[in-house]
Image (cartoon, rainbow, N blue to C red):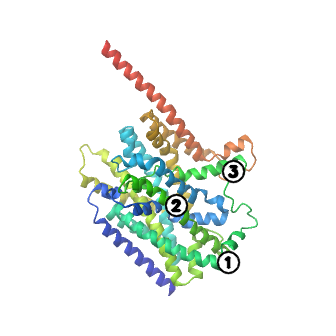
């Protein structure tokens, strides 16, 4: 009976989300409304939208599972790296990009470099979202499976259709409005549950003192002094901290603010919100593993939902699942919208010989959204590891897009040959390193030169190759341009 009431609440919550998205969709008249909410969001709504960028399955279920297993060393990537990304977005990206009339990151690559660079960047950007979206859909399906016993495949299909429906209608306006409401639900639901569980454990002091005896580094923030630990620690910071800066979902939320100043400030406010609120599910999962160690075995991604269902009343269940659904839905909708706008603006639009009307572009973006939903829904059926899916997504954009973006903004000599070389060499080196290098944890702890080289994550090899490609490509490109210019001058003189 209690599970039935909870399931009714979840269904009702989904219906309300679609309704709110439909109401917000009435403001969508142009492609700019669909992609960046017409640049009309006030500061706090823009900050809530940025906060909700990653506060989904990865934080509530993926990172909390890692924390129970590995402690603080296992969560450097998220929430710490994610908060770093928001700070750096405010410092490096928001101000110079807000001044330009852009719908996507790839628009910047066209204006700064060339149309070819725009298309290449879009081809790298779009796939980087697929793993991220799939992770959110898997998490939503886990919730339905936990509450109702519904087969995970059917859960993925239902949740894919739900997210697609309200995002299709409302675009970023729907995402922003629902993010604002869902942020409030997240805060209330998670804080109340955390207070209850910490009280049952005996307070924060008791929680800290209960670190596993067999894991002396459970609360260790800084790496050990050996080179391998330092490399892994830096890589964890970089995965989302740098890798998510050139992602379209962050860009859309940054561009949606009403003013340039609000855009920058929203990044800092969101970073503070993320770094504080993201610790709440970690506290909840750790408290739950202490109170109910029988649940802290096997796949810990479902630890918190299972604990709430088994050991708490309907009121607490509604608060928690309302918060959890809010977190995941807000992340999934924005993540699904991001590649759809890039596909429409920077890929499909290029196939038309004549200029598209704004109404035609809006229609193409919406159809692209359907395609993204179908593909990522299928991917979510196939794969189930939330944390791994998220890591893949950020690493993808780090090795291909981060260096050309920063070089384009801050290196005057950077050119289109360097940008394309950076994307291709970075991505190629990453793929080769993934294939050649041994898996995580298989190198050992010795500090020999060979062990250190083998311990460097594939993502870092890709990042270094991307820098090298940018520098060499730019120098070669500058030389080619100079030679062409000299040849033209000599022909004119002759």
Mark 2–mark 1 contact, CB under 8 Å? no
196 on left or right of 338: right
According to the picture, the residue beneath numbered tag 3 turns out to be 229
Point out which mark residue 143 bears: none
According to the picture, the residue beneath numbered tag 1 turns out to be 202
Labels 2 and 3: the sequence-earlier one = 3
Task: Name the mark nearer the viewer: 1 or 3.
Answer: 1
Is residue 366 visible in the rendered image? The answer is no
**Residue 5, x across and y down, in percent:** 47, 84
Point out which mark residue 272 bears: 2
Is residue 97 visible in the rendered image? The answer is yes
Depth check: 218 or 456 in front? 218
- Kindly indicate the quadrant of the structure image that contains residue 76: bottom right
180 on left or right of 237: left
Depth check: 489 or 91 in front? 91
Q: CA distance from mark 1 to mark 3?
A: 33 Å
Q: CA distance from mark 2 to mark 3?
A: 27 Å
Quarter of the figure with the C terminus: top left
Element class at badge 2: helix
In the image as oriented, which residue stretches furthest toward the bottom? 1
Labels 1 and 3: the sequence-earlier one = 1
Q: Residues within 10 Å of mark 1 (few under 14, many from 20)?
A: few
């Amino acid at each position: 009976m209690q599970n039935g009431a909870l399931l009714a609440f979840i269904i009702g919550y989904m219906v309300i989300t679609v309704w709110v998205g439909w109401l917000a969709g009435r403001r969508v008249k142009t492609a700019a409304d669909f992609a960046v909410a017409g640049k009309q969001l006030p500061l706090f709504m823009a900050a809530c939208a940025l906060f909700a960028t990653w506060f989904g399955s990865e934080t509530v279920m993926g990172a909390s599972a890692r924390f129970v297993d590995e402690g603080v060393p296992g969560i450097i990537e998220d929430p710490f790296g994610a908060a770093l990304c928001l700070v750096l977005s405010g410092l490096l990206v928001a101000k110079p990009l807000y001044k330009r009339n852009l719908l996507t990151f790839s628009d910047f690559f066209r204006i700064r470099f060339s149309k070819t660079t725009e298309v290449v960047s879009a081809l790298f950007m779009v796939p980087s979202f697929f793993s991220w979206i799939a992770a959110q859909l898997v998490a939503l399906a886990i919730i339905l499976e936990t509450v109702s016993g519904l087969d995970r495949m059917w859960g993925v299909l239902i949740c894919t259709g739900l997210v697609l429906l309200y995002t299709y209608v409302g675009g970023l306006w729907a995402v922003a409005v629902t993010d604002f409401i869902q942020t409030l639900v997240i805060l209330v639901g998670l804080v109340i549950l955390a207070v209850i569980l910490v009280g049952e454990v005996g307070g924060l002091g008791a929680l800290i003192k209960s670190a596993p005896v067999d894991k002396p580094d459970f609360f260790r923030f800084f790496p050990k002094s050996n080179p391998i630990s330092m490399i892994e620690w830096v890589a964890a910071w970089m995965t989302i901290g740098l890798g998510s800066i050139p992602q379209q979902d962050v860009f859309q939320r940054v561009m949606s603010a009403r003013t340039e100043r609000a855009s920058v400030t929203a990044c800092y406010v969101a970073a503070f919100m993320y770094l504080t609120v993201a610790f709440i599910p970690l506290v909840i999962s750790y408290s739950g593993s202490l109170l109910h160690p029988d649940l802290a075995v096997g796949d810990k991604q479902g630890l918190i939902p299972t604990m709430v269902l088994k050991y708490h009343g309907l009121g607490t269940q509604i608060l928690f699942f309302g918060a959890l659904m809010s977190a995941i839905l807000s992340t999934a909708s924005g993540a699904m919208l991001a590649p759809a706008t890039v596909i429409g603006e920077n890929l499909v639009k290029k196939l038309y010989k004549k200029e598209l009307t704004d109404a035609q572009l809006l229609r193409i973006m919406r159809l692209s959204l359907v395609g993204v939903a179908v593909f990522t829904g299928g991917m979510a059926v196939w794969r189930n590891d939330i944390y791994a899916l998220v890591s893949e997504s950020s690493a993808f954009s780090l090795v291909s897009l981060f260096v050309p973006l920063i070089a384009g903004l801050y290196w005057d000599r950077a050119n289109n040959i360097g940008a394309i070389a950076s994307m291709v060499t970075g991505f190629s080196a990453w793929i080769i390193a993934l294939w050649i290098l041994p898996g995580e944890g298989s190198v050992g702890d010795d500090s020999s030169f060979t062990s250190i080289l083998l311990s460097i994550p594939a993502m870092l090899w890709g990042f270094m190759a991307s820098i090298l490609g940018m520098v060499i490509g730019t120098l070669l490109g500058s030389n080619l341009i100079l030679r062409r210019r000299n040849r033209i001058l000599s022909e004119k003189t002759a």
